[in-house]
Image (cartoon, rainbow, N blue to C red):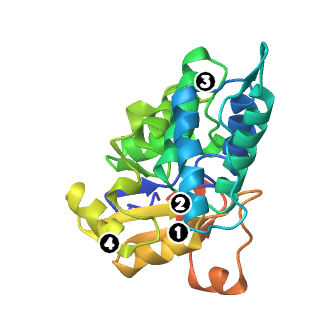
């Protein structure tokens, strides 16, 4: 006998939840190496100088364009950009310059067909089941809303945007701040207890649960390892389809 969901809406993280973490790190970098957007590069360059002035450690500066004869320092700039982005991803930064660069690069790659958003195999079947059951589906990611839409529109499982009712990024608040989840519940006009949040990030799960969301950790290959306390204090799934046989309280 099928279990009737106790939630009216699902809120999904992307990286490590619907999409392999390696997709952002591996595919984005390989695309960046061959495609440089000057306006976005300038934003990264300016942000790096601000970081230096704010005494951040290990900042990677992006050189200005210099020309000697008919040669420029293009390779030096390209190398610095890659290192700068790697540094920002390593420390999990959410600043506008980085997200803007990422979003533009992704949109360009999707339009050209060079990039395809990677989606775990179980996700599409789950999206279909939720949609058939009248469950609303929203996305909440640190990536920009435009980048989120591009990923799901141009995924390796086809255009999945028909299943998604809306998108949220960090303009509504940090993903580890409980106020963000209060804001999302107000925005979609549901009580927090009627929302199921799924993420690989334990801090995000804790914040959502603190304001009465139903929540579960998604454990995927290559995600951050979970501690014994994480396993003791949280519901954990390794596959979206496991959710449909679990009775949330």
- Along the polypeptide, which appears first: circle 4 or circle 1? 4
- Along the polypeptide, which appears first: circle 4 or circle 2? 4
Residue at (40%, 37%) from the top-left corner?
163
Mark 2 vs 1: CB contact within 8 A: yes
The label shown at residue 216 is 1
Q: Secondary structure at mark 2?
A: helix
Q: Residues within 10 Å of mark 1 (few under 14, many from 20)?
A: many
Q: Secondary structure at mark 3?
A: helix
Residue at (67%, 63%) from the top-left corner?
219
The span from disc 2 to disc 1 (Cα, nearest Å) is 9 Å
The span from disc 2 to disc 3 (Cα, nearest Å) is 33 Å
The quarter of the picture where the C terminus appears is bottom left
Q: Position of residue 32 (x, y in %)?
A: 69, 32
Name the residue tied to disc 2.
Answer: 243
Res 242 → quadrant: bottom right
Name the side, left or right, on which 94 lies relative to 165.
Answer: right
Mark 4 vs 1: CB contact within 8 A: no
Name the residue tied to disc 4.
Answer: 179
- Along the polypeptide, which appears first: circle 2 or circle 3? 3
- Along the polypeptide, which appears first: circle 2 or circle 1? 1
- Along the polypeptide, which appears first: circle 1 or circle 3? 3
The span from disc 1 to disc 3 (Cα, nearest Å) is 32 Å
Q: Position of residue 133 (x, y in %)?
A: 36, 47
Q: Position of residue 6 (x, y in %)?
A: 35, 66
Residue farthest top in this picture: 70
Q: Secondary structure at mark 1?
A: strand
The span from disc 4 to disc 2 (Cα, nearest Å) is 26 Å
Mark 4 vs 2: CB contact within 8 A: no
Res 217 → quadrant: bottom right
Q: Position of residue 47 (x, y in %)?
A: 54, 50
């Amino acid at each position: 006998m099928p279990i009737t969901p106790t939630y009216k809406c699902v809120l999904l993280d992307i990286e490590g939840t619907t999409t392999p973490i390696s997709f952002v790190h591996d595919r984005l970098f390989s695309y960046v190496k061959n495609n440089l957007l000057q306006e976005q590069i300038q934003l990264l360059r300016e942000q790096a100088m601000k970081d230096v002035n704010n005494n951040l450690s290990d900042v990677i500066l992006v050189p200005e364009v210099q020309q000697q004869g008919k040669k420029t320092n293009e390779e030096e700039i390209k190398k610095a950009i890659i290192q700068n982005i790697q540094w920002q991803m390593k420390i999990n930064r959410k600043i506008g310059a980085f997200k803007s660069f990422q979003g533009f690069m992704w949109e360009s790659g999707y339009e050209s067909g060079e990039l395809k958003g990677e989606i775990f195999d179980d996700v599409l079947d789950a999206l279909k089941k939720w949609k058939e059951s009248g469950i609303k589906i929203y996305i909440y990611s640190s990536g920009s809303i435009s980048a989120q839409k591009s990923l799901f529109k141009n995924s390796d499982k086809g255009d999945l945007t028909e299943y998604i009712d809306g998108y949220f990024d960090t303009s509504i608040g940090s993903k580890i701040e409980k106020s963000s989840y209060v804001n999302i519940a107000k925005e979609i006009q549901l009580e927090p207890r009627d929302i199921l949040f799924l993420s690989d990030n334990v801090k995000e799960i804790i914040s959502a649960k603190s304001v009465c969301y139903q929540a579960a950790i998604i454990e995927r290959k290559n995600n951050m390892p979970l501690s014994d306390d994480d396993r003791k204090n949280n519901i954990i799934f390794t596959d979206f389809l496991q959710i449909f046989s679990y009775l949330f309280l």
